[in-house]
C-alpha cells in the first residue's frame, strides 16, 4: 500500500538557537514547534532506503532527490542532509505553513509509497501580568494577562483549585475571575499553550468593607465605585416621611406616594421600603452629582428637603513598583497605579520614611528618592475614596558611583537621565582665578572676581568651596562635550580641558519569565528597560556553564537551559549609570503524558505549576487482530514503549481499516442483491423459455463474533459460500432465515 509524507506546517513561534527534530518516518505523526526558529524533519534513516523521492508543499516541489544528489532545491533555507536522511527548515515563517508531501520511488522510478506528518508551531505565551481591583460589594476582580497563541488559563489559591465557595464567577478557565468577599491567600495564575507555559503569583488581602452612604444628614458627601453599587439611607422608616420625591438635577428619580412608587420603576435604582434605603446599581460617572429629597406630610404639605453629593470614582488598580540606582548612589523608586485621584504613602520596615532616609522630602507622590545606603522592606500604599491597594519589595542599597573627575583632559563621564551629576573641575578655585565653562562651544557660566558671571543658573550650581559643579535634572540634551577654558588673574589664557558627558536612562527593575520548550529545555527571559543594558546570569552563585546551557551566550536577555536544570537563578542588568537584578528558584521542566478532560496531553511543563493533568494518567489500550484461518483473535494490551508514543487514532488505523472493509463488502453485497432482484423480474418470461440456463449463487455471510459487545467497532468475520452451476434455474421464492446473512444472486447465461 502506498505510503506519502504529508507535512502540515502551521507556524506560530522557538528560540532560533534550538533545532528540535520531528520524526516524519511515522505516518500521521504530529509535532509542535516555534516561529522564527528551525526544525529538523527526519524523513528516513538512510537514503539507500529511498533511492528517489520528491518533497512537495501544496503540490510545489521543494526538493527532488535522484541518483544520490539533489536535482531540484527551491529554497536555500531548506537544506537536505543525506548523511542522516533529514531535512531542515530554517528561519520559520508563517508563510511556511502548508501541506508537505514526500513521494517515494524505487531505482526504476516506480512509486513505492507516502506518509503524512503535521507540525503545529505556535508563539509561546509571554510572561504573566496580574492585576486586582476591589468592587463595591467587596468582591475582588483579578485579571491575568499574557500574550501568545491560544493561551489557556488556570488558577489556584493556596495550592488548590478555586472552589464555588471562593468564586463569585464560576469559570476559572478565563483570564478574569471574581472572588467572593473575605477571600485571601496565595493566588497563582498559570497560562499555557501547546509549546510553553508561564505563571504569576501574588498574595491577596481581601477587600475592606466600605461604610454605607448616610443620606439622612443634610449636605452629606458619599463616594462610590465606578461600575459598582451604592446603598443610600434616605430614612429610618417610611412612616416618618409619608410622601417624598427624590431628584437629581431637574430629573425625578423616585416618587413615593400612598406607600408605593408612583413613578415608573427603574430596575437599576430600586427602593427598599422595609429599611428606607435606595440602591444605585452599575454606577457610571454620570451618576455623580447632587441629589435632593423633597419631603411632604400626608396632606401634601412640604416638610423640608435634604441634599446629598455623590462622587463616583474608578478604583485604584494593582500597584507596580520599580527602582533605579542613580549616579550618586541614591535610589529612585516609582509606584504606579491607575484610578481616579490616587493618594500615595510609603513605609520602610513598618515606619513612615524620615528625612534622614529621603533625598526627596515628599512621600505623598508616586516617586521618591532614597539617600545612599538605605535598604529594608519598602511598601507603597495607594488609595482613593473607594478602594486601596499596595505593593512591597525588599530593597538593597545602591553602590555609590564615583563622581565625575573633570580635572583630567579628555575624561568621560556618565549621568542618569532625570538625576544629577557632580563634576570636579579643580581642587581649589585659587588654582584657576578665572575660567569659562562651555558645552558644545556655548557658554554655561563664567567665573571671575570670585563670583559667577553672568547670573547663576539654578539648575547648574558651582561650589567654590570644593571646586565642583553640579548639573541637576539631567536631560539627553545635556550630553555632549564640555570645555573648561582657564585664565590667569590678568585674563591671559593658560590652557583648557575637555570632558565628554553621556546622559543615559537607567535600567529599570527586572522582569523574569520562563517557558518550557518542547524538548524539555527551559527558555528564561530577562526584561529591563533603559539605555544600553548589559546582562549577566548566575545559577546557585556561579556563572552558567556549557553543561547547563543549551544556548552558549549568557550576555543576552534570553537564555535556554538544558533539561533537568534547577536552582537559584539570578539575572543582573547594568549600564554605565545603574544596575538591577531579579532572582527566581527554578524547578526544571518535567514531561507529562496524561488525559485531561478527554484530551490527551504529552508535553514538557514547569514542575512547580503543573495543573494540566487533572485526571489519572491513562493510556488507551490498543487492540491487535490476528487472522487465524476463518476466525479472528484479538489481543488487548496497555500502551507500551513499542507504541512509539503515537496518538491512539494512529495506532487504531489498522482496526478502523478492517471495519471499513467489512462495511464495504456488506454494501456491495446489498447493492448486488437489489440489482439482481430487479433484473429477475424483468427477465422472468425469458427464464421460463431457457431451460438450459445456469444459476450462480454467491453466499456472503457476515457473522457476529460471540462474546463481542455490539457498540465496539471491531472487524467482522467474513464467510464465503460455495458457487454452484446448474442447467435448471433455481429461483428462491423466500429468503433463508439465517441471522446476519446477505445473499447476492448472479445468473449466468449459456
Image (spheres, rainbow, N blue to C red):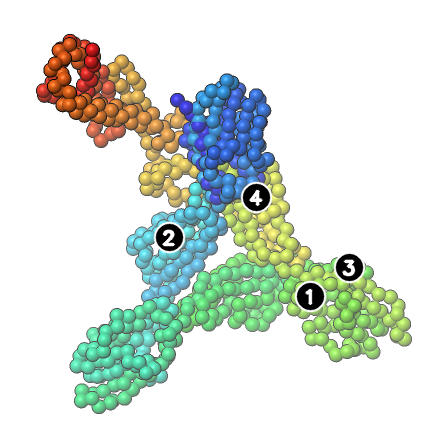
Q: Are marks 3 and 1 in contact (CB under 8 Å)?
A: no
Separation of residues labelled 2 and 1 (CA atoms): 47 Å
User: Residue 690 falls in which quadrant of the image?
Assistant: top left
Give me the C-alpha separation between circle 3 and circle 4. 36 Å
- State the residue position of label 1: 477
In the rendered structure, the answer to whether residue 287 lies left or right of residue 98 reads left
Q: Crowdedness of circle 2 by 10 Å Cα count: few (<14), some, many (20+)?
A: some
Q: Are marks 4 and 2 in contact (CB under 8 Å)?
A: no
Check if mark 3's residue and mark 4's residue have beta carbons within 8 Å.
Answer: no
SS category of the residue bearing label 1:
helix
Q: Secondary structure at mark 4?
A: strand
Location of residue 117 in the rendering, given as x and y in whole percent from the top left corner: 44, 32
- Disc 4 crowd rating (10 Å Cα; few below 14, some 14-19, many 20+) is many
Element type at mark 3: strand
1 or 4: tag closer to the N-terminus: 1
Q: Nearer the viewer, residue 351 or 504?
A: 504
Task: Identify which residue, 501 or 685, lies in the foreground.
Answer: 685
Q: Which mark is residue 29?
A: none
Q: Nearer the viewer, residue 660 or 62?
A: 62
Of the two numbered discs 3 and 1 on the same chain, state the one appearing first in sequence.
3
Does any portion of residue 622 appear in the rendered image? no
Can you say whether 293 is above or below 497 in the image? below
* Location of mark 2 (residue): 174
Q: Earlier in the sequence, mark 3 or mark 2?
A: 2
User: Residues at badges 3 and 2 in contact (C-beta under 8 Å)?
Assistant: no
Closer to the chain start, of discs 2 and 1, is 2
For residue 559, which numbered disc appears in the image? 4
Residue 674, quarter of the rendered image: top left
**Residue mark closest to the camera, 4 vs 2:** 2
Tell which tag, 3 or 1, sits nearer the viewer.
1
Judging by the rendered image, the residue that carries numbered circle 3 is: 411
How many other residues sit within 10 Å of disc 1, few (<14), some (14-19) or many (≥20)? few
Amino acid at each position: 500500500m502506498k505510503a506519502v509524507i504529508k507535512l502540515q506546517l502551521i507556524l506560530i513561534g522557538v528560540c532560533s538557537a534550538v533545532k528540535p527534530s520531528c520524526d516524519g518516518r511515522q505516518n500521521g505523526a504530529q509535532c509542535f514547534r516555534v516561529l522564527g526558529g528551525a526544525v529538523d524533519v527526519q524523513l528516513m534513516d538512510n537514503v539507500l532506503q529511498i533511492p528517489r523521492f520528491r518533497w512537495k508543499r501544496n503540490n510545489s516541489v521543494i526538493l527532488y532527490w535522484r541518483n544520490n544528489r539533489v536535482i531540484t532545491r527551491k529554497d536555500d533555507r531548506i537544506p537536505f542532509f543525506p548523511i542522516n536522511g533529514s531535512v531542515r527548515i530554517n528561519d520559520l515563517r508563517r508563510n511556511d505553513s502548508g501541506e508537505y508531501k514526500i513521494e517515494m520511488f524505487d531505482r526504476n522510478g516506480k512509486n513505492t509509497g507516502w506518509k503524512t506528518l503535521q507540525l503545529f508551531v505556535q508563539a509561546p505565551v509571554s510572561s504573566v501580568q496580574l492585576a486586582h481591583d476591589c468592587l463595591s460589594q467587596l468582591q475582588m476582580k483579578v485579571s491575568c494577562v499574557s500574550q501568545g497563541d491560544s493561551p489557556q488559563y488556570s488558577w489556584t489559591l493556596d495550592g488548590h483549585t478555586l472552589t464555588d465557595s471562593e468564586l463569585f464567577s464560576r469559570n476559572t478557565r478565563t483570564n478574569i475571575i471574581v472572588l467572593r468577599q473575605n477571600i485571601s491567600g496565595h493566588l497563582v495564575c498559570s497560562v499555557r499553550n501547546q509549546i510553553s507555559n508561564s505563571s504569576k503569583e501574588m498574595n491577596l488581602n481581601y477587600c475592606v468593607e466600605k461604610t454605607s452612604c448616610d443620606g439622612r444628614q443634610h449636605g452629606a458627601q458619599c463616594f462610590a465605585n465606578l461600575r459598582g453599587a451604592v446603598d443610600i439611607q434616605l430614612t429610618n422608616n417610611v412612616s416618618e416621611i409619608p410622601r417624598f420625591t427624590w431628584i437629581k438635577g431637574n430629573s425625578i428619580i423616585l416618587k413615593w406616594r400612598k406607600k408605593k412608587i408612583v413613578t415608573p420603576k427603574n430596575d437599576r435604582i430600586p427602593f427598599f421600603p422595609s429599611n428606607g434605603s435606595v440602591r444605585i446599581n452599575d454606577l457610571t460617572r454620570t451618576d455623580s452629582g447632587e441629589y435632593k429629597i423633597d419631603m411632604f406630610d400626608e396632606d401634601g404639605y412640604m416638610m423640608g428637603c435634604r441634599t446629598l453629593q455623590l462622587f463616583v470614582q474608578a478604583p485604584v488598580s494593582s500597584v507596580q513598583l520599580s527602582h533605579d540606582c542613580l549616579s550618586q548612589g541614591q535610589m529612585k523608586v516609582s509606584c504606579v497605579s491607575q484610578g481616579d485621584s490616587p493618594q500615595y504613602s510609603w513605609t520602610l520596615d513598618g515606619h513612615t520614611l524620615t528625612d534622614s532616609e529621603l533625598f526627596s522630602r515628599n512621600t505623598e507622590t508616586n516617586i521618591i528618592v532614597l539617600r545612599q545606603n538605605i535598604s529594608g522592606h519598602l511598601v507603597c500604599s495607594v488609595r482613593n475614596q473607594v478602594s486601596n491597594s499596595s505593593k512591597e519589595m525588599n530593597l538593597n542599597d545602591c553602590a555609590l558611583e564615583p563622581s565625575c573627575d573633570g580635572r583630567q583632559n579628555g575624561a568621560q563621564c556618565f549621568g542618569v537621565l532625570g538625576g544629577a551629576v557632580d563634576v570636579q573641575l579643580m581642587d581649589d578655585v585659587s588654582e584657576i582665578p578665572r575660567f569659562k565653562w562651555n558645552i558644545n562651544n556655548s557658554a554655561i557660566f563664567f567665573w571671575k572676581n570670585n563670583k559667577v558671571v553672568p547670573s547663576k543658573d539654578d539648575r547648574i550650581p558651582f561650589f567654590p568651596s570644593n571646586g565642583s559643579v553640579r548639573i541637576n535634572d539631567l536631560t539627553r540634551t545635556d550630553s555632549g562635550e564640555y570645555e573648561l577654558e582657564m585664565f590667569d588673574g590678568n585674563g591671559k589664557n593658560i590652557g583648557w580641558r575637555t570632558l565628554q558627558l553621556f546622559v543615559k536612562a537607567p535600567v529599570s527593575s527586572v522582569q523574569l519569565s520562563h517557558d518550557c520548550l518542547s524538548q524539555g529545555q527551559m527558555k528564561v527571559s530577562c526584561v529591563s528597560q533603559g539605555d544600553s543594558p548589559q546582562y549577566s546570569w548566575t545559577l546557585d552563585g556561579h556563572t552558567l556553564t556549557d553543561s547547563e546551557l543549551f544556548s552558549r551566550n549568557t550576555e543576552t536577555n534570553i537564555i535556554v537551559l538544558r533539561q533537568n536544570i534547577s536552582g537559584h537563578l539570578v539575572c543582573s542588568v547594568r549600564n554605565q549609570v545603574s544596575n538591577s537584578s531579579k532572582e527566581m528558584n527554578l524547578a526544571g521542566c518535567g514531561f507529562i503524558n496524561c488525559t485531561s478532560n478527554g484530551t490527551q496531553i504529552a508535553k514538557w511543563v514547569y514542575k512547580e505549576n503543573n495543573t494540566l493533568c487533572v485526571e489519572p494518567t491513562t493510556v488507551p489500550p490498543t487492540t491487535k487482530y490476528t487472522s487465524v484461518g476463518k476466525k479472528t483473535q484479538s489481543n488487548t494490551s496497555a500502551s507500551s514503549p513499542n507504541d512509539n508514543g503515537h496518538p491512539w487514532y494512529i495506532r487504531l488505523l489498522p482496526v478502523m481499516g478492517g471495519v471499513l472493509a467489512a462495511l464495504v463488502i456488506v454494501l456491495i453485497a446489498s447493492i448486488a442483491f437489489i440489482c439482481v432482484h430487479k433484473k429477475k423480474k424483468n427477465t422472468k418470461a425469458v427464464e421460463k423459455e431457457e431451460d438450459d440456463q445456469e444459476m450462480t449463487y454467491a453466499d456472503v455471510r457476515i457473522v457476529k463474533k460471540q462474546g463481542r459487545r455490539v457498540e465496539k467497532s471491531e472487524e467482522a468475520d467474513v464467510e464465503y459460500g460455495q458457487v454452484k452451476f446448474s442447467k435448471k434455474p433455481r429461483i428462491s421464492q423466500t429468503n433463508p432465515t439465517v441471522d446476519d446473512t446477505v445473499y447476492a444472486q448472479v445468473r449466468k447465461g449459456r
